[in-house]
Image (cartoon, coloured by chain):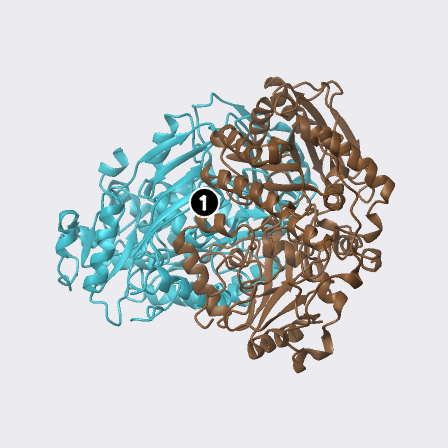
Chain colours: A cyan, B brown
Amino acid sequence: MSSIQRARSFWGWGFADRFPDDDARRAIGAHVGALLGCTPELRAPPSLDAVKMGPPRAAVPADIAAFATQGREERARHAYGRSYRDVARGFAGDFATAPDVVAIPRDEAELARVLAACEKEALAAVPYGGGTSVVGGVEAEISGALRGVVSIDMRAMGKVLEVDAVSRAARIQAGALGPSLEKELAAHAMTLRHYPQSFEFSTLGGWIATRAGGHFATLYTHIDDLVESVRMVTPRGLFATRRLPASGAGPSPERLVLGSEGILGVVTEAWVRVRPRPKWRSSASVTFDDFFAGARAARAVAQSGLHPSNCRLLDGLEATLNGVPLDAPPEADGVRSGVLLLGFESADHPVREPLGRALALALAEGGRCPKGPRHKEEEARGGDDTSEAWRQAFLEAPYLQSTLVSLGVIADTFETACTWDGFEALHAAVAAAVKGAMPGGRGVLTCRFSHVYPDGPAPYFTFVVPGKAGEEIERWWAIKRAASDALSAGGATITHHHAVGRTHRPWYDRERPDLFAEALRAAKRAMDPQGILNPGVLLDPDATGCS
Amino acid sequence: MSSIQRARSFWGWGFADRFPDDDARRAIGAHVGALLGCTPELRAPPSLDAVKMGPPRAAVPADIAAFATQGREERARHAYGRSYRDVARGFAGDFATAPDVVAIPRDEAELARVLAACEKEALAAVPYGGGTSVVGGVEAEISGALRGVVSIDMRAMGKVLEVDAVSRAARIQAGALGPSLEKELAAHAMTLRHYPQSFEFSTLGGWIATRAGGHFATLYTHIDDLVESVRMVTPRGLFATRRLPASGAGPSPERLVLGSEGILGVVTEAWVRVRPRPKWRSSASVTFDDFFAGARAARAVAQSGLHPSNCRLLDGLEATLNGVPLDAPPEADGVRSGVLLLGFESADHPVREPLGRALALALAEGGRCPKGPRHKEEEARGGDDTSEAWRQAFLEAPYLQSTLVSLGVIADTFETACTWDGFEALHAAVAAAVKGAMPGGRGVLTCRFSHVYPDGPAPYFTFVVPGKAGEEIERWWAIKRAASDALSAGGATITHHHAVGRTHRPWYDRERPDLFAEALRAAKRAMDPQGILNPGVLLDPDATGCS
């Protein structure tokens, strides 16, 4: 549980002690400056004592006083997620939108009391897991009759309650952070093996509410695929589904909860599908002279029925920035080279043969694999993936983003999914839109596939551009808007696994069927008749009848 | 398209010419009589001219007269699905609940006109695909303000509209029957490979509305997993989702349509994921002295990550009745022996290795495989699975049920899913309940797994008991109730892939969260404000505000 005690940054990603010192920041600034053709400036990080935050707009409701606070630090720490915009505002010391109350219920009964108090006092109720939302998912805007905001932090409900080794399932409380639940599962020789980039600082409940994407590049790509049953407390009572491996009884009730982003209720626990730690691993890196040849290779593997655990394609620039070796220097635009990372894993059997077949498919598209495949056999308890370069860079990336904010550099990612037939055109449209929105055309855009499906990839884009003091958020919005417009116009989704929150609302509203929005609004009215839950997420704040 | 022109039975399963002649029926009767200890009687099949059916309660609305009829034969043919109760009533010539009008819209505009006419004239609108529902899904009860029933037959919208070979997806109209869509896909060297038992006589739209289960024993078990996007016409307009391989943007809109059983709208088309026909196949039959040892073997395979296309466990009696060879005679109660049918298939690579590993897992649980594994490599276009004994029996079973009805014998199936830790207790409880409800204790009950998951199996039960003239439906209900009560009490689902319809309502109502029912009711109100669509399915007929 050291991850809970070690101090978290109140404005940036992760642990406070991971923020680099000035020398290290200077080195990073020089590196990024060379890439962007600008001179990043070393800005001073904020102090918690000096942040701007108004007094609470509402008092702590008496009925929840035993487990709620209006402490300045707790309010600041619950003000934001960790989007670029959040970190930039946090770094600037702007905590104007901090919640008025932070409640930390210890069980479902206390959680129900929080919701009842919010209804009684006309307060917005914002579920808070690890606070890693990158889409404004934990920052409530209030309007209408609502008088203030209660952030509901689920950290006191974070245990593994039960493990069914026969069915390979575990009952876990929603507030469990990734490392904590994995540690508890390891005692049963099991693992959930769901590793979103936010793994260290995000919770099972947050993953379920936002349909988080995880470790597996194919098949079990979202937490959705690992949820056996779910419990959610709503203002109208408990929504609890039966433990079932599958059912055909009406529309899936779990699927209404998955992706509901806290607008219907607060997820309290779930039975999730677990597995033994993998023992056999086979992997290979395949390089291409053309990113799109790499994409065709990824498609061939995705359509082969081989089901790799890793099938991540990086363009040349993405590979370079992430320390993944290419066998030729990448071109500036990134798409003249690519690396396909292939991996198979199993707790049951060697995976040399499927890796061999996937490699053959990749080589048939013009790939090269000078180092050949690697095979590892490990004790079931030992070893993990973190030693690999891409994975290390993957976990470092959010820290780097926070550091770049402190240097006045704008860096962010966005992601989508589309069908294979439309990918090349979508990539071109996104690149044109993002580059067109870069100030003075300066900046870099990279692309990788985070997951692949038989019918299409999930492309993940990163952009880095120079900021200008005081205009960073405006510049960021310009790029975000251009990228989102391009995704939407290209028929792709506004998010494959980052969720909708408040940031993606305009494009989500174009994407989902209008009648689905009406159905969701009606469902919300049934469970949250006063419209207290996470107003502004997925639906307009006035989505219910009363506000 | 011969399957459309060949005459269908108006009361029983499938093609009329498949109903056996009296000699064949006598032979079947003698066989079943020996099994049950009774003497089945040869009853005379009904004549369409003589069936009982009242005059229509409502006239054909003028606006849909060009594509609607009140013809006696069409009304009779749309009266029922093909549950035991349906076939028994049909055989008895009882068509009292026939719809008043049969509409056959040719496009979405005509379909919208049907729904508008139903709203205007206060008629129930019952979507009708292939009419193979075994849960009363196409037989409307009307109450409240509704004056009559329009059956909406989707047969005129049955084409494959588009194939995207790059993304391996096809746009197919909802009224397409299995053989027809497979024939059209074969011209593109593709297949959907979704084979429910009703395959010849059911439609894509019906599969989507009822979350049909198909060919694959693991991974892609339901049509849900093959749907990329969907279009549905509702009384409030079109509900159309975007073609996406995956998305994390809010709760999945497709998942609200999947399993909605015609209460929200009428599915008109979908993009579905297709694939090339398999070229490599490896299979093996493993016999066990104990059905539950076979279940442990199935569990080991389901949890291995090998993803077999076939992993069907039959108990000894089920194997015998389906012509699957056992290496020892089965005991009367079935559970002292079992056969596990393992199969792997691929269009991309040989599957000897995974079959070998699955076989090793099965042998480790005490299985025997005297014949060893079989491996086939075929041209992509040639061959299919129908030569195998179990598959042939699988497709014959509904015909046999109709024949047994004509002999006064009650035969039916029910199915569920549960977690592995609860399977043995559930099996015991179901067996005790069903045997307790059998008249005089006479009858047989068999069990197989239709699909398996890492966290549990989908057990599928068949019962055959003697009937008594005039009391068959009562006897059937007694067993159905006992079985359903046992499933429900055991924490299992009331249906893994047969749907809810009207028959499963009492147990569905216990299973789904009450708040989910409220959400569904609210969603229905948003899309079907007058409550015309399939009243009584999933929700009470008075689920909307106005009726």
Residue farthest bottom in this picture: B62
Identified at 46% across, 23% down, the residue is A380
What count of labels does the image hold?
A: 1
Residue farthest front in this picture: B469
Q: Residue B139: in sight, yes or no? A: yes
Q: Position of residue A398 (x, y in %)?
A: 36, 47
Location of the N terminus of chain B by quadrant is bottom right
Is A129 situated left or right of B197 in this image?
Answer: left
Of residues B215 and B289, the one drawn nearer to the viewer in this rendering? B289
Q: Residue A69: in sight, yes or no? A: no
Kindly indicate the quadrant of the structure image that contains residue B436. Answer: top right
Identified at 41% across, 65% down, the residue is A522
The amino acid beneath tag 1 is Ile
Circle 1 marks a residue in which chain? A
Is A138 situated left or right of B424 in this image?
Answer: left
Q: Position of residue B214 (x, y in %)?
A: 65, 45
Q: Which residue is mark 1?
A: A223
Of residues B415 and A375, the one drawn nearer to the viewer in this rendering? B415
Within 10 angstroms of label 1, few (less than 14), some, or many (20 or more) residues?
many
